[in-house]
Image (tube, rainbow, N blue to C red):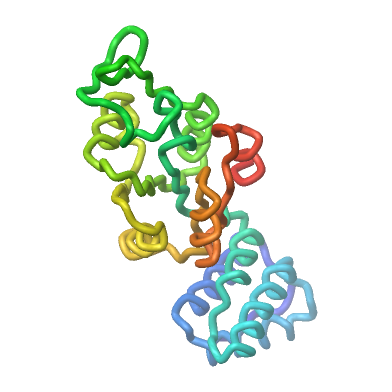
Amino acid sequence: MAVASGEMGGSERCSHRMALLRMVLRGRLRDLALLIRSLCQSGGRLAICPFLWLLSENLMAGARRGDWFDAAAHLRLDAAMGESKYKLAVFDLDFTLWDAGGTWCDCLTPPFRKTAQGVLDARSAKVRVYEDALWALERCRELDLDVAVASRTNEPDWARELLDLLELRDRFRWEEIYPSSKVRHFAALKEKSGYIYEEMLFFDDERRNIVEVGALGVRAVHVRDGFRRGVAEKELG
């Protein structure tokens, strides 16, 4: 693929960036190498040096592992192109999205009801959504991120009913709600969404979940003493 000499306009530079990215995604390494060589021969007049540098970093890191694609370098590549490094934000429920009356939702007593005071169980324990969690959900919407739930509650139907009563369920594209290690939840989310683990952001209050899911490559953020906006701002801006 030849590259004309001389200065390029913004649209032409953008076209070359997209061509590079398509080749990366398709694994066309020979064509990619030829294009990079041609770009380098243009005398450094292209304003995509950071992009090329990160692209070469990706290829070199992959080559060292015997694999052409390096996920971490790919995320830095996205950042260079002005894209969000996260594609999916995942929220735990108990003590992350909500406080179920000071306990876990599977320790409540149904039936649940919606009143002027909020969503209550049969003993009037209130399920309260953290205000800062609502902010985070709205911020995800602004960033056009997909959002999912990952909960290991022993009462999945109760959790879904509470999400309905709190008018939150339609905010989540995927729900993985069942008792299990959250490694299983995230394997399911990876399959359903098509996103790699490194493109996922996860909020949870339990350290064991943070450790297990973080080991997959997910950015796992530990929520302490209820959801706090400052924790989310560090990741979502």
The quadrant of the image that shows the C terminus is top right
Instruction: List x then y, in percent, for residue 30.
Output: 54, 92
Q: Does 204 sit above or below residue 81? A: above
* Place of residue 18 in the rendered image (x, y in percent of width and height, measured from the top left): 53, 68
Residue 66 percent across, percent down from the top left:
56, 91
- Residue in the picture at 58% in, 33% down: 225
Confirm whether residue 7 shows in the render: no
Taking the image as shown, residue 121 lies to the left or right of residue 5, namely: left
Is the residue 93 above or below the residue 199 in the image?
Answer: above
Q: Is residue 77 visible?
A: yes
Task: Tell me if residue 10 comes above or below residue 53 in the rendering.
Answer: above
x and y, in percent, of residue 31 in the image: 53, 88
Q: Residue furthest top?
A: 116
The answer to which of 200 and 53 lies nearer the viewer is 200
Left or right relative to 154: residue 228: right
Q: Nearer the viewer, residue 121 or 134?
A: 121
Circle count: 0
Q: Which residue occupies 59% across, 43% down?
A: 236
> For the N terminus, which image quadrant?
bottom right
